[in-house]
Image: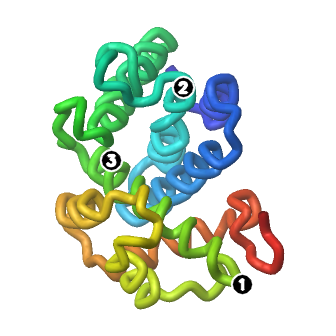
Amino acid sequence: MEIRREDALALMHEYTQNENLRRHMYAVEAAMRAYARKYGEDEEFWGVTGLLHDFDYERWPNDERKPDDEHPITGVKILRERGYPEEIIQAILGHADHTGVARETLMAKALFAVDELTGLLTACALVRPDGINGMKVKSVKKKLKDSSFARGVNRDDVNKGVEELGVDFSEHVQLVIDAMSEIKDELGLGGGGAD
């Protein structure tokens, strides 16, 4: 199967109507593309993995009462039916600890490392007048330590992701800030009245 962003984008839009969830997937895609460039990997392949990692979440949110009918279990069934490669499927399964799937590839580790961080960076940008423009790693670290800020962000996952990927924390945050800055208008994080 040829991996094409346009096909992945159509699939994501088919299953996800919530604009904020779509923006999260765009942010993760941008970060995954940046990591693919850094590591000399296939940018389209890594980007599509980021774009699709939560495509099923809106329809099948996590529900402990229905473990076989929840995110990302249901989503990967759809991806398999559509012929997506097992490497993408394993990375998507691995980004959710409750699946019990180990993150064995560099791509899977990168997906886990950027997922929660993009949420934190989005929250940081939304409370700044300039959005993501000029965001400093130091201020992100300060917000990370403030447990009352962006409560939905799993701090343990942010730290565990950096550890598993084996990267410097500050460099990791900067890489993801830079990646998200490239698509700041699409993410609504340009500042100056961005929604």
User: Alpha carbon of mark 1 to alpha carbon of mark 2: how far?
Assistant: 41 Å
Q: Circle 3 sits on which residue? A: 107
Q: Of 38 and 184, which appears nearest the observer?
A: 184
Residue bearing the label numbered 2: 2
Q: Earlier in the sequence, mark 3 or mark 2?
A: 2
Disc 1 or disc 2, which is closer to the eye? Answer: 1
The x, y position of residue 125, in whole percent, is: 61, 74
Could you say where residue 189 lies in the image, as x and y percent from the top left? 69, 69
For marks 1 and 2, the one nearer the N-term is 2
Point out which mark residue 27 bears. none
Q: What element carries label 3?
A: helix
Looking at the image, which is closer to me, 44 or 169? 169
Name which residue lies at 56% across and 84% down. Answer: 135
Where does residue 45 sit, x and y in percent of width and height? 47, 40
The amino acid pointed to by label 3 is: Met
Compared to residue 101, the image places residue 170 above or below, namely below
- Of residues 160 and 166, the one nearer the viewer is 160
The label nearer to you, 1 versus 3, is: 1
Task: Between label 3 and label 2, give the one nearer the viewer.
Answer: 3
Q: Residue at 29% across / 77% down in the picture? A: 169
Which residue type does callout 1 highlight? Pro
Callout 2 crowding tier (Cα within 10 Å): few <14, some 14–19, many ≥20? few
Would you say the residues marked 3 and 2 are in contact, meaning their CB atoms lie under 8 Å apart? Answer: no
Disc assigned to residue 129:
1
Report the residue at 48% width, 23% height from top.
60
Marks 3 and 2 sit apart, C-alpha to C-alpha, by 18 Å
Local SS, label 1: loop
